[in-house]
Image (cartoon, grey):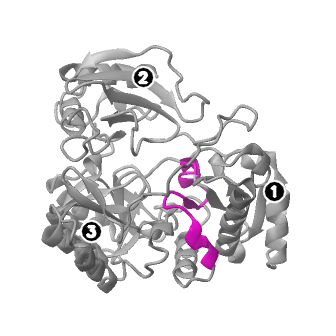
Amino acid sequence: MSLPPTTIPPADEAPSPRARGRDDACPGALRLHPADDGSLARVRIPGGLLTAGQARALAGASEELGDGRLDLTSRGNLQVRGLDAACGGELAAALRGAGLLPSDRFDRVRNIVASPLGGLDGAGCGDVTAWARELDTALCAGTWEELSGLSGRFLFAMDDGRGDVAALGADVTLIATRDGGAVLRVGSGPGDDLEVRGRDAPRAAALAAMEFLARVRASGTRVWRVRELPAQHAVTADGLAARLADEGVEAVRIGQSGREATPGVPPAPGVVSGPDGRHAVSVLVPLGRVGAAQWRLLAGLASRGGSGELRVTPWRGVVLPGFTADGAAAAAREVADAGLVTDPGSPWVGVGACTGRPGCAKSLADVRAHAARAVAGAPRSPDTPQGSGDAPQDSPDAPPVYFSGCERRCGHPGGRWVDALAISGTDYRLTVRDTREPDGVTDAGATDVAAEQLADAVATARGTA
């Protein structure tokens, strides 16, 4: 499901920056977050890149210390839930042993997404995972000590030129170009992009984050994201270019026109063919929650027939690279038999939900159960055989739908989407929202429906949005 780019209105139209009256409480591997179903830990997976061994270690930690499941987040990270509040030391030791906690000080700063199909399908401008690895390695080494002051919500994106993760509204984005360079973008507000050499790209991204922190200090405010900076203290192309020049990084302004890009499409479930005769398997995890046994299956397939690598996507999926054509087809069947999605026509495509009850005390409803019922009851066209997975709302132009248990709408998609907001334990309010709009709402009308009517109501909303 294609997610439109998240952009921010011009500064003269933008809402006032948030006043952050407290420290960032974003959870991490060392800072557990209390929830109704126990504590949760968020494990950063920079670039979404995991080895099969690391994946197995996470499965073990979820079984031994948590509830036996893993949650995939909208930033390609993983969460372990149902933890005892006193197990932090044991969890940290397990993660360190697997190489998943290389730096205590920079744990929550390692928010880096990368195009998950980069270098695998022949699209885009190459594999940008090297940028993600280089930036993360330098962060963990303390190369830029100042960056430990970033909030746990600050996001870096490494886009291979197809526009997929560039559409996620990151604070600092690198976009690969055909000539081996990179477009450097800070936020999505007014101003020109800069172009830097590919070898300088990770360093330029770090310097852009330092320029953001400098603007935060100059503003005298406490903000966590680039878009929250007061307009008079925004990061400018001139200011950033000067900082880069001081550090020996050459940057060229490419003007406003360089900001225009067609958003790419997130990986569809199924087999992905590559130009080198190798294939990948793209797996969608329904509602982003996977059991330890399913997760071990993915790790095992990556080891047996793939490259030994897993790529967690910001769309709550996993890409397994490195298969032969026959091996990929067999792996896709095995994954589907285990209850995960490898059918691009599945009604699960484009459907998401927050944690909901019983895990979140703020939620008004068990949104995951209601979302599952809506998917199971999705109407099908008269010509579509039952069980084929093809439903009318799954057209390429249909916006995603997201079920939220409260007004916070944690983890909702960017761009245009159908908002299914719980207003009681059994009722929902459906609207169309767009994070590119100043007020976030594009459809003035709202439809209130009972949970048992969600399948038809959601299909209608997605079909007419």
Which residue position holds label 3? 327
Is 15 situated left or right of 435 in this image?
right
Is 39 situated left or right of 169 in this image?
left
Residue 431: assigned label: 2
Three-letter code for the amino acid on which mark 3 is drawn: Gly
Which residue position holds label 1? 237
Q: What's the distance in space between the residues labelled 1 and 2, CA to CA?
A: 37 Å
Is residue 166 rendered magenta in the image?
Answer: yes
Q: Residue at x 54, y 39 (%)?
A: 4
Residue 398: assigned label: none
Q: Nearer the viewer, residue 35 or 51?
A: 35
Q: What's the distance in space between the residues labelled 3 and 1, CA to CA?
A: 48 Å
Three-letter code for the amino acid on which mark 1 is drawn: Ala
Q: Nearer the viewer, residue 327 or 285?
A: 285
Q: x and y percent of residue 18 in the render?
A: 59, 43
Q: Earlier in the sequence, mark 3 or mark 1?
A: 1
Q: x and y percent of residue 178 in the render?
A: 70, 63
